[in-house]
Image: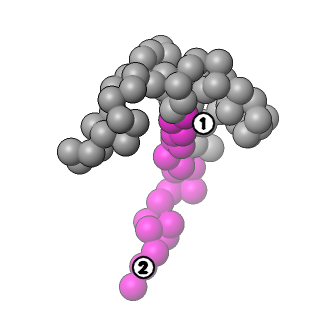
Amino acid sequence: MHSPAQNQTPDARLEDDYITIVAPTLGEVMQQFRDSGLAAKGYAIAGRVARHRFDVAGVDPFGGAPMSAATFIRNGR
């Protein structure tokens, strides 16, 4: 049995890594980003920050409250 790593070329790029932070306010999202040290780990914001309503497989995890969310990306190396 071969591992997936054996099928990669030496210069194959690892997949990008995404983290989405969800909080009631943008300030709390950004505070969590800072507190987690994500910038030092190579993460940068991937796109626009916006208010969201979440529906996870028919369940509303936030009770209908609008939440702010931002997705951060770290490029594979």
Is 41 covered by the magenta stretch? Answer: no
Q: Which of 32 and 2 is in front in this view?
A: 32
Identify the amino acid type marked 1: Arg
Q: Give the range drawn in magenta.
A: 1-21
Q: In this picture, is 23 found above or below 57? A: above
| Residue 22 percent location from the top left of the image | 51, 32
| Residue 47 percent location from the top left of the image | 48, 18
Q: In this picture, is 38 found above or below 53? A: below
| Residue 57 percent location from the top left of the image | 23, 47
Q: Mark 1: few, some, or many residues within 10 Å (few <14, many ≥20)?
A: some
Q: Is mark 2 on a helix, strand or loop?
A: loop
The reply, left or right, for residue 59 in relation to residue 3 is left
Residue at the location (75% across, 30% down)?
Answer: 34
Q: Which of 76 and 54 is in front in this view?
A: 54
The reply, left or right, for residue 35 in relation to residue 62 is right
Residue at the disc numbered 2: 2
